[in-house]
Every structure is written in structure tokens, then in C-alpha cells.
Amino acid sequence: MRIFTLLSQKSPRGLPQTIFRRSGVRRRSGQAMIETGVVIFVLILLSMGLLQYGILYNAKLALNNLAREGARYAAVHTRNPIDSASNPTGFKALVVQRMKDKATGTSIDPSVINNSTISISSLSGKTDSSGQPIFDVGDSVRVQITYNLRDNKIFVPVTFPGMTAAFRNNLVNYKTGALQNIEG
């Protein structure tokens, strides 16, 4: 197959003129447009995936930081009898409020952080008669957060093909925690 066709023509002045014309241009005129469309589609899909990963990773880092902040606050304030011994549910409310304050300005919605999404426990497992944890010097405070990422963090459908139910559940309900030692 010849790619170029050599044509000789006379110019308006009577001199010979050589013109190179590409053969088959009409047959391949839409090929570049189709290839561009396919490549752009793949690039958009990859960039959306990277953007989604970045959003989820940012939420994960913010939740880990909130758990650390809550554990630190709980460890420091467990020795205060006004906070912990006299009113253990008030103590949890103080920790939750501290975590809400720290969540302001992050990608985490502070209104979602409440007593049902936060759990505070003693690593030793000691509890009083009401089931509230008892904290001793040398013990560790464990603060756990469960956060639903479906509401405002995931724009890829949760029923995306190839996702298993376990992966989907772990992706939607992110759970993290932090430990902090209580010092005297």
C-alpha cells in the first residue's frame, strides 16, 4: 500500500509543481477522535479514583487524629474526680465534646460524633457496678470511633462491580481507635 501519491501538475505560471497527497486520509479521519475519546475516558476514570482515594485517606487521617485527641484528653482527665468518678457519663460527654471541637475544620462532620459513635474503655477491662470503666494509674484508655463514610465521603457507588460485601462494609463503616497511658 502506498502512503503517498506523487502528482505532477502545472502551476498557474506554467512551471511543474509536485504535490504529495496522503492516500486513505478519509478512511482514518475518525480514528483519532475515537482514540482520544477512549483515552480521555480512561484518564477521567483514573483521576476520579485517585480523587476518591485521597478523600477517603484524608477522612482516615482525620479520624485517627480525633481518636488520639480523645484518648489523650481522657487519659489526662481521668484523675480528676469531678470528671470521672462522680459522673462517668459526664466524663464521656466531655471527651465527646473535646473530639467534636477538634473535628471542626476537618473533613469530619462534628454533628455525627456522639455517644453512640464513640466508645471509651479501660484496657484492663475493670468496670464499676454501672458498667462504666474504672481507670487506674498505669492503665491505658482506649477510645474508638465508628464513622459512616457513605454519607459524605464516597461518590463511587458502593455497589461497584467487583466489591465484596465484606470490603463494602469495611469501606462504609470505618472504625479506628487510639490508646493512651494514664500517668500519675
Image (cartoon, rainbow, N blue to C red):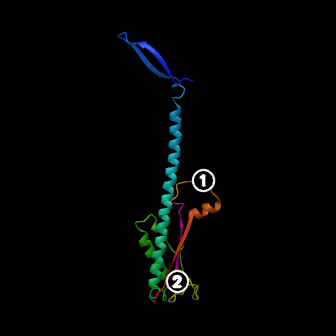
Front residue of this view, candidates 82 and 164: 164
Q: Quadrant of residue 16?
A: top left
In the displayed orientation, state which residue is furthest to the top.
14
x, y percent for residue 63: 49, 69
Which element is circle 2 on? Answer: strand
Task: Using the image, tell me which numbered label, if any, was put on residue 160.
Answer: 1
Which residue is found at the position 45% from the left and 14% from the top? 8
Q: What amino acid does circle 1 point to?
A: Phe
Residue stretch in magenta: 142-152
Task: Using the image, tell me which numbered label, if any, was put on residue 45.
Answer: none
Left or right of 13 in this view: 69 = right
Q: As displayed, is residue 28 above or below residue 6?
A: below
x, y percent for residue 102: 42, 71
Q: As displayed, is residue 78 above or below residue 162?
A: below
Which residue is found at the position 45% from the left and 63% from the top? 107
Front residue of this view, candidates 75 and 13: 13
x, y percent for residue 26: 52, 25
Left or right of 112 in this view: 159 = right
Within-10-Å neighbours for mark 2: few <14, some 14–19, many 20+: many
Q: What amino acid does circle 2 point to?
A: Ser
In the displayed orientation, state which residue is furthest to the left.
13
Front residue of this view, candidates 89 and 127: 127
Quarter of the image containing the C terminus?
A: bottom left
- CA separation in Å, label 2 and label 1: 40 Å
